[in-house]
Image (cartoon, coloured by chain):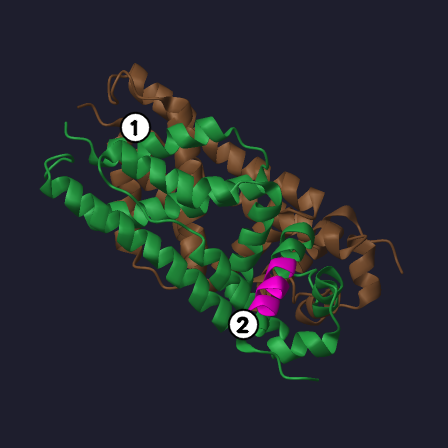
Chain colours: A brown, B green
Amino acid sequence: MPRLTEATAAKRRMHILDATAHCLFERGLLATSVDNVCTQAGISKGAFYSHFPSRDALIHAVTDMLAAELGPIEDGSIATLADSVFERRIAPALPPAHARFGIEVTAASTGDSGLRERNTANLERLRHAVEAAAHRLIAAGKARADADAATVGWLVQAHVMGVLCRNAVWPAQDAAALRRGTHLLLESLLAPV
Amino acid sequence: MPRLTEATAAKRRMHILDATAHCLFERGLLATSVDNVCTQAGISKGAFYSHFPSRDALIHAVTDMLAAELGPIEDGSIATLADSVFERRIAPALPPAHARFGIEVTAASTGDSGLRERNTANLERLRHAVEAAAHRLIAAGKARADADAATVGWLVQAHVMGVLCRNAVWPAQDAAALRRGTHLLLESLLAPV
């Protein structure tokens, strides 16, 4: 096979990752094989393996790509924080195919250390962002002085995981009701009394 | 095979269910086969199939058995409610093997309608129990009058799912810290201001 320039290789790699994300959302994690990805991407298995050494490496690269697409958590106010938790971390994962993929990744994380590392790094970024936001809101007098920022951090992390889990079990949740729940949670935990 | 009396058949069935629970917690849902269960129970496959028509039927019966072991949600006060949510629904599922089984059941529920039905019935019982408890606490003046009992119900359901999901991802969570989180959540959502 001729050597690809670096730019072409990066472009092909991204094309394979997009095809993989398509397969993962359409078929699920367990049902997606390297063959499916090659068919979707319109490439040979030889070409595939010149970009990724294994299916595991591919899945890890896709989860990295999806994680990079998550935006930052904002914290101008409790409402802004609640909105950004909902918009950045809950809403994108609500479509049934995304929900199934999310829960499959969590289940597979118990057995695949590379996947587990990525999944946990992602979840910990959320926890730390919410904890830091709570600290800033307390310091700015916009949250109550005795709020427990660390506990709020993990409760919101558990909230996001739980809402997505519920959504995987009962697809097509009312997004507006879910958003109100995230707001009620953060207002209850943080609002000055 | 000779006919068993009804009592003997019920006893053998329970013996198979206990052996299955053992396998499920030891090996996980996906890795547990009818062969494993027969070995664990010390019975032949013929004997197995005289009690359960299929592996699916067996898994459904085990989840029914495990659900029946969950105790009631109590609601004398917000603290009692928080304690019983934690004791009945979170603490029993914290050991890593139970956590893995729980998340596997949730993942498998997206593809197995019988499992899904049981999983959702279980989760809905929790939601309804918490919602009813919140209504009673409000009526008794022990929770704030404007608390949103329905939202509290699903937020606590999501909390339990999220905490168990986190625990599957990060085994060996500090149970005392988790209990404090469940208390903080319910106090924040319900306590009179």
Q: Nearer the viewer, residue B39 or A146?
A: B39
Q: Which numbered circle lies on residue A76?
A: 1
Whether labels 2 and 1 share one chain: no
Residue reaching furthest to the right: A1
Secondary structure type for disc 1: loop
* Residue B30 x/y as whole percent: 66, 61
Q: Nearer the viewer, residue A125 or B182?
A: B182
* Residue A168 x/y as whole percent: 45, 59
Q: Which numbered circle lies on residue B7?
A: 2
Examine the rendered structure and indicate whether residue A166 appears above or below residue A181. Answer: below
Say if the magenta span includes residue A32: no
Which chain letter goes with mark 1? Answer: A
**Magenta segment, which residues?**
B10-19
What type is the residue that disc 2 sits on? Ala
Mark 2: few, some, or many residues within 10 Å (few <14, many ≥20)? Answer: few
State left or right for residue A89 relative to residue A47.
Answer: left
Q: Quadrant of the N terminus of chain B?
A: bottom right
Mostly what secondary structure, the magenta segment?
Answer: helix
Q: Nearer the viewer, residue A52 or B29?
A: B29
- Foreground mark, 2 or 1, reads 2
Which chain letter goes with mark 2? Answer: B
Examine the rendered structure and indicate whether residue A100 appears above or below residue A105. Answer: below
State left or right for residue B136 relative to residue A168.
Answer: left
Secondary structure type for disc 2: helix
